[in-house]
Image (cartoon, rainbow, N blue to C red):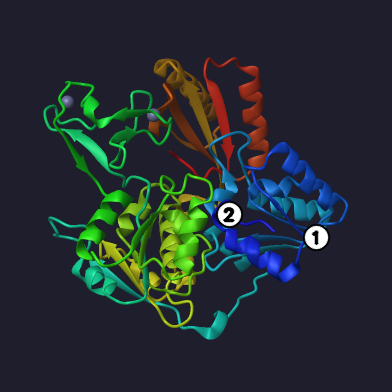
Amino acid sequence: MLVPEITLTPQLEERFVLRFGDIISVFHSRLTPLQKFNRWLNVRTGRAPIVLGARSAIFVPAKTGIIVVDEEQDSSYKQSDMMPHYNGRDIAILRAKIEKIPVVLGSATPSVSTYYNAKIGKFRFFKIEKRVKETPLPKIYLADLNGRRTGIISEKLLAALEQKSQSLILVNRRGFAKNAVCLDCDSLIECPNCSVTLCYHKKNGQLKCHWCGYKQKVDMGCRKCGSSNLRFIGTGTERVETCIKEAFPDKIIERFDSDNTKKKGSYQKILNRLKDGEIDIIIGTQMLAKGHDYPGIMLSAILSYESLLAGADYLSSENAIQLALQVSGRAGRMSQGKSIIQTYNIHNPDFIDIIRHDYVSFCEKELIIRKRHLYPPFSHLIRMISINPKQAEGKKDMQYIASWLSDRNIEFLGPSECLISKIRNKFRSHLIIKTNNVKSSVRFLRNLVENKKFDSRIVMDVDAIDFF
Ligand SMILES: [Zn+2]
Ligand SMILES: [Zn+2]
């Protein structure tokens, strides 16, 4: 059984052990080689016939009878940040096909591609009509943030937070962190190694890069003009925490994000306190939306729907609506809960589907758009990235690939600089190929990359979902 980010969902392991006893072996990338070996041995000898794990567990060499992929739409099944690029969900489908066993893709909000495959009969579709305990779905309300000059929390949300039961607030990590701007030269303080702005961490007075780990003291000031006249803008979890604490001095408020849960066991501690009702309001990133089940939470909120759309690629609407429905689902596991979505664009048509919990309607509309523009599931996307310490060389290599593709009448987008055009002092350009014949396209491209001596490192990501 595959689950996304197992280290974040210790509850799940507990449940499996409770139900099946000591025959579970858990696999994830943080195990030591010895741990891995021992667990593999337990699987091999039949002592632990149930493998529970994150994406890499799909490679466990064991005799399998069935594969279950929970939350199959989850982007953490895709390994995009290092080689090899693969999607654990897709490997599961392939492995099941090879081993002639069933594979179950589970989700309340399946990916649009999986929905399509079920719709056209490529997959069999089983719909669960009733909720566990038959609790009605939470009521979802919108809060209009437009025209607000100050404050990041609407009156509607403030009023709702007054309630006595527990609340959860989602703050998106990407594109929504707190940045520093120099008031003397008007520039954002950027990472010297990457083309991203540094994030401000109040706790230790540092500015940090979330891509390469670079950090500097705030006292260092602006590297461009030397001024120490900095202002901090944006909405990180820390700032939200401060705002909520000011509004509700008597409530116990806790933050749940990767900065706050880095220490071993600390995320478990926070989640246990949440379970025991020792936290009134929990504020966190996507980590919080994943598979946790806390019956005390009656209110969930999304600080800004637009921040969920940060990717600006063909998947951004899909990912945003999935996350919105997941977060709303965290509220009211025992009786009907309430969910508030704050937005700067109240006319976004997707809200009609969100408020009605009508995910299928969203998928149908999305499929029309995808078909028109030939996006997956109506094509495969292959992303080619050049990585080079010299920007001009990287661009030249991408240009070469582009004209090579043009000569063969292969459709592609780009080339252009990546959204994050520099990471760790290496420049990145990319182009995206749309193809209906993924096997032959990959063969062509691999031949090209292997035979032509490019100056840059060329990375090929088949069925890419990350376009940064
Ligand atoms: Zn400056
Ligand atoms: Zn950096």
Numbered label attached to residue 156: none
Residue at the spot x=60%, y=68% of the render?
119
Q: Which residue is mark 2?
A: 4
> Which quarter of the frame holds ligand 2?
top left
Instruction: Give 101 or 49, whichever is nearer the viewer.
Output: 49
Secondary-structure class at tag 2: loop
Give the image quarter of residue 199: top left
- The residue at 67%/45% (across/down) is 56
Rendered view: 165 above or below 14: below
- First along the sequence among labels 2 and 1: 2
Q: Nearer the viewer, residue 462 or 60?
A: 60
Give the label on residue 101, or none.
1
Q: Quadrant of the N terminus?
A: bottom right
Q: Residue 380, how many percent across, how many down?
A: 57, 46
Name the spot of residue 424 as percent of width and height, x first.
Answer: 43, 25
Q: Amino acid at mark 2?
A: Pro
Q: Quadrant of the C terminus?
A: top left
In front: label 2 or label 1: 2
Q: Is mark 2 within 8 Å of ligand 2?
A: no
Disc 1 residue type (three-letter): Ile
Image location (x, y in percent) of residue 192? 33, 23
**Label 2 neighbourhood size at 10 Å, few (<14), some (14-19), many (20+)?**
many
Please report the residue visible at 65 percent of the width from the left and 59 percent of the height from the top.
69
Label 1 neighbourhood size at 10 Å, few (<14), some (14-19), many (20+)? few
Residue that lies at the very extreme toward the right in this rendered image: 45
Q: Secondary structure at mark 1?
A: loop
Q: Is residue 166 visible?
A: yes
Residue 386, above or below 374: above
